[in-house]
């Protein structure tokens, strides 16, 4: 009976958050790299695992921003025959890589902290506090630079979370340095490092779910599958709907494909138009590929358990 496609908003659009330029991200990268060198060097001098860990985490911040920057540039590329949806999902992949890196860093921090709890080192608390205080200022400044874009991009939000987590690390390192400097409690360094790793893992757990759903081509969270089928079956001339696939292209675009079973004598072209208008209005789905089939005919698509199925 034919196919109909909607292509609104697919071609020639970057779908990128506004308000933050590439130059801003590059500045944040350079500052974080400089901070990384200062903290790692200071950590060796002060014999502080927490400070070295904070420096390594700052390095991950810089790499996260580099990844976010690259994905942001890649996502601007227009759609092509080989990449018909464009490159917007590059930001989703970048976010996933950033979260995996955070998990790896947190596990490493925890292992190092457990090892140092057995025999706490003699840490130079004053130097630790000074460098961690400087790191906190840089972390907060970097987070402020990308805050606007973080509200609209899962990719930039992952990098933003890196900076917030590292700011928390810096606060804890300052506290540990203060306890060591004031009371000689050297166990504070590994204890706080262990707590920090747990906090970072908790934050990642809260954020990685939606990214995984997009990578797995899952339906957007909160979509009622039965209600969607029922709404399409309620279109004039439609006897039923099946072979429904719904997935997120990226954070801002959702796609759908479905077969509509038409009653005898029904106007398939009009039914498809009405179904698309309903999907756009009621479900926010702008890209829909709809095939119309006659009632009683076998499903035209093989696979997915529909082989030879009659309506």
Image (cartoon, rainbow, N blue to C red):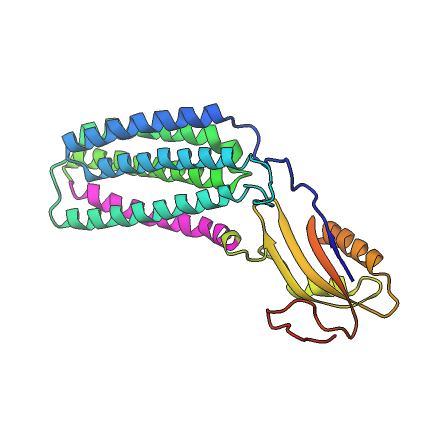
Residue ID at (45%, 28%): 25
Counting from the top left corner in percent of width and height, residue 122 is at 11, 37
Is residue 156 visible in the rendered image? The answer is yes
Q: Does residue 95 lie above or below 214 as drawn?
A: above
Q: Left or right? Give the position of 213 relative to 28.
A: right
Which quadrant of the figure has residue 220?
bottom right
Vertical placement of residue 20 versus 212, above or below: above
Quadrant of the drawing holding the N terminus:
bottom right
Residue in the foreground of this view, choosing between 47 and 100:
100
In this view of the protein, which residue sits in the foreground, 235 or 267?
267
Q: Residue at x 34, y 49 (%)?
A: 103
Side (left or right) of 13 relative to 267 = left
Quick check: 100 above or below 37?
below
Residue 187 drawn at (x, y percent): 17, 44
Task: Check residue 195 for magenta coloring.
Answer: yes
| Left or right of 263 in this view: 97 | left
Residue 134: tell me if it is visible: no
Based on the displayed image, in which of its 4 quarters is residue 229 positioned? bottom right
Q: Is residue 172 above or below residue 135?
A: below
Identify the residue shown where x is 68% and y is 75%.
309
Toward the viewer: 149 or 235?
Answer: 235
Question: Most prominent secondary structure in the magenta stretch?
Answer: helix
44 in the magenta segment: no
- In the picture, the quarter occupied by the C terminus is bottom right
Q: How many marks?
A: 0
Whole-percent x and y of residue 270? 84, 56
Residue at the image point whose x is 57% and y is 30% from the top: 18
Q: Which residues are magenta?
A: 186-213
Residue furthest out toward the right: 265
Q: Position of residue 48 (x, y in %)?
A: 18, 36
Q: Residue 99 versus residue 256: which sits nearer the camera?
A: 256
């Amino acid at each position: 009976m034919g196919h109909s496609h909607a292509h609104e908003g697919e071609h020639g659009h970057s779908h990128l958050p506004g308000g933050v330029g590439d130059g801003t991200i590059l500045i944040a990268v350079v500052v974080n790299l400089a901070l990384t060198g200062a903290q790692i060097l200071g950590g060796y001098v002060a014999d502080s695992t927490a400070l070295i860990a904070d420096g390594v985490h700052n390095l991950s911040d810089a790499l996260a921003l580099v990844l976010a920057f690259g994905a942001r540039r890649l996502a601007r590329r227009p759609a092509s025959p080989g990449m018909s949806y464009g490159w917007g999902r590059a930001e989703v992949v970048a976010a996933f890589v950033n979260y995996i890196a955070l998990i790896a860093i947190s596990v490493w921090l925890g292992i190092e902290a457990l090892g140092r709890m057995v025999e706490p080192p003699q840490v130079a608390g004053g130097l630790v506090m000074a460098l961690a205080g400087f790191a906190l200022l840089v972390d907060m400044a970097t987070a402020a630079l990308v805050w606007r874009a973080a509200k609209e991009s899962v990719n930039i939000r992952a990098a933003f979370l890196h900076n917030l987590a590292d700011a928390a690390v810096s606060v804890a390192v300052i506290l540990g340095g203060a306890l060591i400097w004031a009371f000689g409690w050297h166990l504070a360094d590994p204890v706080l490092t262990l707590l920090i790793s747990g906090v970072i893992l908790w934050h990642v757990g809260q954020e990685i779910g939606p990214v995984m759903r997009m990578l797995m081509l899952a339906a957007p969270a909160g979509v009622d599958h039965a209600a969607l089928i029922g709404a399409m079956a309620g279109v004039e001339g439609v006897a039923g709907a099946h072979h429904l696939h719904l997935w997120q292209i990226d954070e801002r675009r959702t796609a759908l494909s479905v077969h509509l079973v038409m009653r005898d004598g029904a106007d398939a072209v009009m039914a498809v138009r009405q179904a698309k208008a309903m999907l756009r209005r009621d479900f926010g789905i702008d890209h829909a590929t709809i095939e119309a089939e006659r009632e009683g005919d076998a499903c035209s698509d093989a696979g997915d358990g529909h082989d030879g199925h009659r309506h």
